[in-house]
Image: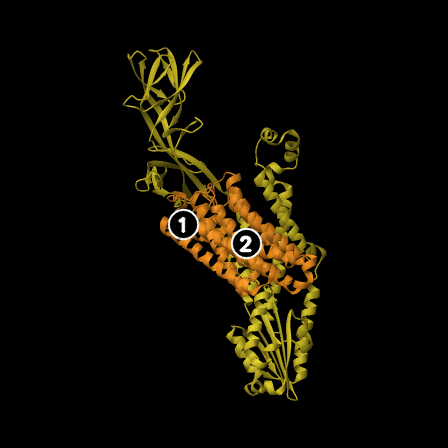
Chain colours: A yellow, B orange
Amino acid sequence: MEKRLTASTVHNKVATQMNVKETNRLRNAGSKLTKILCSVKLAIVALLFIGILSVVGTLVPQGGEVARYVELYGPLIAGIVSKAGLTNVFSSLWFLLPVGYLVSSMIVCSIRRLRNVLRAARKRSVLLEESKYELKPYHQVFSLSADAGLDIVRNGLREKVVEVLEKSRYRIADSVSSENTHYVSADKGIVGIWGPFLVHLSIIIIIIGGVWSAAASFSHFLDIEVGQSVDIPETPYRIGLSDFIIEYYEATDQPKEYISLLSVTENGRVIGEGELKVNAPLAIEGLHFYQMKYIPSVADVTIAVTRDNGEKIGEFRLPMVHGRYIEQIGLTVKPAEFAPDFAMTADKVAVSRTPNFNNPAVLLDIYSDKKLLGSKWVFFDPAGFHTSAEAGYIYELKDFTLKTFSGIRVVRDNAVPIIYAGFSILVLGAFLSCYVFHRRVWVMVKSSQGQIKLCVAGACNRNMLDFQREIDKCLREILPPTQEGLL
Amino acid sequence: MNTSSFVGVAMLIYIAASVGYMIFALTGNKFVRIAAMGIAAVAFTIHTAAVTSRTIEAGRLPLTNTYETLLLFSWALTLLTFWWQNRYEVQILGAFTFPLVFLLLAAASLPQISSEIQPLLPSLKSNWLLAHVLTCFVAYAAFGVAFATGIIHLALRLPAKRKLWLSRIELFDNITYRAIALGYPLLTVGIVTGAIWANSCWGRYWSWDPKEMWSLITWIIYSVCLHLRYAAGWKGRWAAWAAIAGFISVIFTYLGVNYLFTGLHSYA
């Protein structure tokens, strides 16, 4: 690495490298369009615009009917909101334009940036001529007198500089020595310059994945009853639910796990089966199954009816909601609502505390010739404490038929690997951008007539703060204690 | 002592620490600074006890509801404050972050925030929980520091202070950038792990849910912050305002969304 050169060769070498840089810069100036696409300020404005529209998108309910907005905001504002496309922000021109700008900007700038990154990686060993030191963001000059610097001179200042830089994990990129002048250039963290390129690339990949996913994926919600099976839309398959299990945390009624036992068939032949749990999707034939919901559903209730003088009329099985006409009493009874764990709130509203069948109750609407006579909550009450009389009869909940449905989502999305690749690159790029800084240091040691001149310059693409701390620390190690006051 | 009494005591001591650091910020008195640092250290010890006792009571790390994450968020903010106060020799930081820590703990003590220990919902039982929650809240703490240094930067720009602190103005601008750069990749990981988790739980990595949208808005604001460094003349003042706006968005994403919208992310 080390070469012995005359002072003028050093100068020429440094100057040539400078000239190449100039030409490249001119070549990069590019067309007007490139300028617009690569404007940081325009990108910031576009990002802010997307941010503001996203805020609007969360504040204004999206994709509703016009009537809903009139109800929410009144006719005038509702008109403006829907005319401006704010009811479908994310597919409006307002949103797609800045997104389109940013995507094209990221593509153009990524190509440019890639060129710069490759060039920077190639040209890391540029030495700095003396007059350029003060142009760098960090620069210091020390004049060491012969006495103070004597030890350094004896031990070799250049060697000390190299040693300290290497201890701080710098890589000595180039070093040139002439008779009484030494140049050193060192750097570290060059991999960090890939960060922004990777972040922008990953966003493009994620957007491509998202568009592909929106165009080519499907997702369906299926509510399947235990023991039943249904066709999976858009596929030749059928899915059956053989059982549905709820596990509870010990001694509580807090569900711990919902488990569906599934089997997928094609023309009656089983092609896959398994246990589906929350957070543990099943993959069968490129389809992914997700456990979404537990839907307990009461199909019918059995009600005992007694005349209020105690005469038993009989027990009747009534389908939920529709109910039926009971000939013996001449009334129609409709079970309108079912509460598995009935409770009254403080303001006398009937609710179900939990989905568990701790205190089942049914709300009966009692009609005579389509005229509602009354509504009554009726309880499962073998001891007969809570008799509920209405229209001359006492009703009692005797039994109910429970049907269990499992809510399952079926998804086919071939774009997921692309999205995940984008995510990985994004995370890598973000860490490289923000945690790894490309730091470059140039040092010149020049001795003449018992005087030693030490020039230090540094540049860091980001985070000058920590860079400065580091260089100051290095200098404290290099300089003799008497010279430390210079810092 | 249980968690909530630890929180109560820590909260009171954080008030004292905040007052101490404020007096130091105004007077520059060295003894006040040392006293304030000591008080803050006591508060932090008790705060750590609160986090530890919650972990023991619940039998798992405190990551699963608003109460637990408030403890964690404020704890990380204090830790980061101590670290950077010394690293960058900006003791004044505590005058702005400790009141924030106090407010977060005060929020945790509100009756609306349930401190009850609930068994985990099936949808929260996932290996992604740790990575998702931890990265988000460490990021939030870093953004809290950026918020504080943003305010300090703007305060130093006021005409009366200008001459006195000129060299410090740029320092606080740099720390704001540094804090955002610390938090940004972590927020990115938080959002990405959230998306992957959502995909394994609900079959969709992005549902345009309010929590997701607001985390994206926050991410966009901090992306703007990072780009402001490269737009000539837009760093400094505008970067400070962006850091403040970003933190408001963080708080809204974290707390506001839960109370104003209904969505998938209803636990915290």
SS for dot 2: helix
Q: Residue furthest bottom?
A: A449
Picture quadrant where residue A362 is located: top left
Depth check, mark 1 against mark 2: the one in front is 1
Q: Report x, y in % for residue B230.
A: 64, 59
Residue A310 visible in the picture:
yes
Q: Report x, y in % for residue A50.
A: 61, 46
Q: Amino acid at mark 2?
A: Gly
Q: Which mark is residue B3?
A: 1
- Which quarter of the rendered picture does the C terminus of chain A lie within? bottom right
Specify whether A433 is left or right of A262. right
Chain that bears disc 2: B
Measured in 3D between alpha carbons, the distance from the residue under mark 1 to the one under mark 2, in whole angstroms, is 24 Å
Q: Residues within 10 Å of mark 2 (few under 14, many from 20)?
A: many
Q: Which mark is residue B144?
A: 2
Specify whether A13 is left or right of B264. right
Q: Amino acid at mark 1?
A: Thr
Picture quadrant where residue A454 is located: bottom right
In the displayed structure, B194 sits above or below A314; it is: below
Residue at image x 65%, y 77%?
A: A141
Chain that bears disc 1: B
- Which quarter of the rendered picture does the N terminus of chain A lie within? bottom right
